[in-house]
Amino acid sequence: MSTEAVSAIRTIHSHLRTVLTSLSADDWAAPSACAGWRVQDVLAHVTSNQKEFVEPTPPPAEPVPAMTAEEAMEALVAPRKDWTPADLLAEYDQYTDAWFGALDALQQEPLANAPLAVADLGTYPMHQIAEAFAFDHYCHLRVDLLAPTGPLAIELPPATHEELRPGVDWMFIGIPQMQPVDLPKVVTAPLAVELTGPGGGGWTLRPGADGGLIDVHEGVDADVVATVTSSAHDFVRWGTKRCDWRECATVTGDAAYAATVLDTLNIV
């Protein structure tokens, strides 16, 4: 189950709430490291996702075209663009307890292993949605909002392994399904990813059977042809295309092959 992820979310939520209650008007309007979003829009994304998870908006009367996950995120932020920071914080606080309760409930059967489709990102056991939220909260707080990559020079305790690892786990869990067509074309040999520091560990990406989804598993296999190394925190950055992997990762072995895979990889 994903109880560690729920614990991580509680910690990250507390840190995020500390940051959000200390901002000036200029801080709220500053561009974040999430392209196209102000600091205020990042909160609009976080709180709208939380609200929809607890209290989904009823579907429209007329069918509408399916949206990608990124389009759905933008659609939730758009109507909140003109909200005040106080309005956004009020919504965030309104649904927090119910959100925690729902995440706790998803760690228990019969819900834990029931499948849940996540837009175009794949289908996962419900308990793993806690990892997805841990990833989302960590990335937006530590990468998009806080300096040096974000605009806010606010001091928080350093991120711990327990805070970061569930989000990293989600990234590797999601890799095969997030790019089901593109990645099998370029993952033609075993590739290792070794992450250092809090949240770190080792993983292997292998070609899928019969051209299907690639295989991603924890542990570094003996036959990898290249190894990519960075901190776990920097993996959150380059794995989501917030920076070029060449800026904060190193490659040993077949560098040309690794570059082809890493240039294609895009974790949402």
Image (cartoon, grey):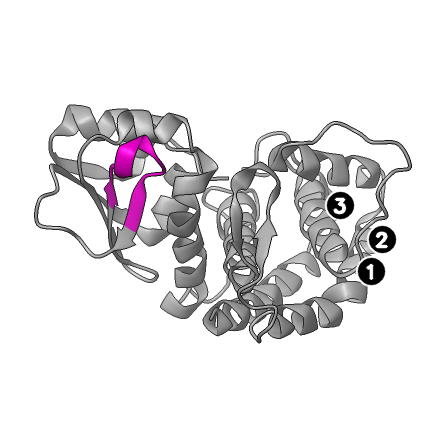
Residue 257 x, y percent position in the rendering: 18, 26
Q: How crowded is mark 3: few (under 14 residues within 10 Å), some or many (20 or more)?
A: few
Res 106 seen here: yes
Number of the label disc, if any, that sits on residue 87: 2
Q: Residue 155: horizontal and vertical position, in percent?
A: 51, 60
Q: Do the residues labelled 1 and 2 touch (CB within 8 Å)?
A: yes
* Residue at point 51%, 39% (across, down): 268
- Res 262 → quadrant: top left
25 to 169, vertically: above or below: above
Q: What stretch is highlighted in magenta?
A: 205-216
Number of marks in the rendered image:
3
Where is residue 72, by image quadrant? Answer: top right
Residue wearing tag 1 = 90
| Residue type marked 2 | Asp
Closer-to-camera residue (107/46):
107
Quadrant housing residue 212: top left
Report the residue marked by disc 3: 25
Helix, strand or loop at mark 2:
helix
Q: How far apart are marks 1 and 3 (CA)?
A: 17 Å
Which label sits in the foreground, 2 or 3? 2
Name the spot of residue 40 as percent of width and height, x first.
71, 44
Within-10-Å neighbours for mark 2: few <14, some 14–19, many 20+: few
Q: How far apart are marks 1 and 2 (CA)?
A: 5 Å
* Rendered residue at 71%/39% (across/down): 29
Q: Relative to 163, does residue 184 appear above or below in the rendering?
A: above
Residue 208 in percent (x, y) is at 28, 38
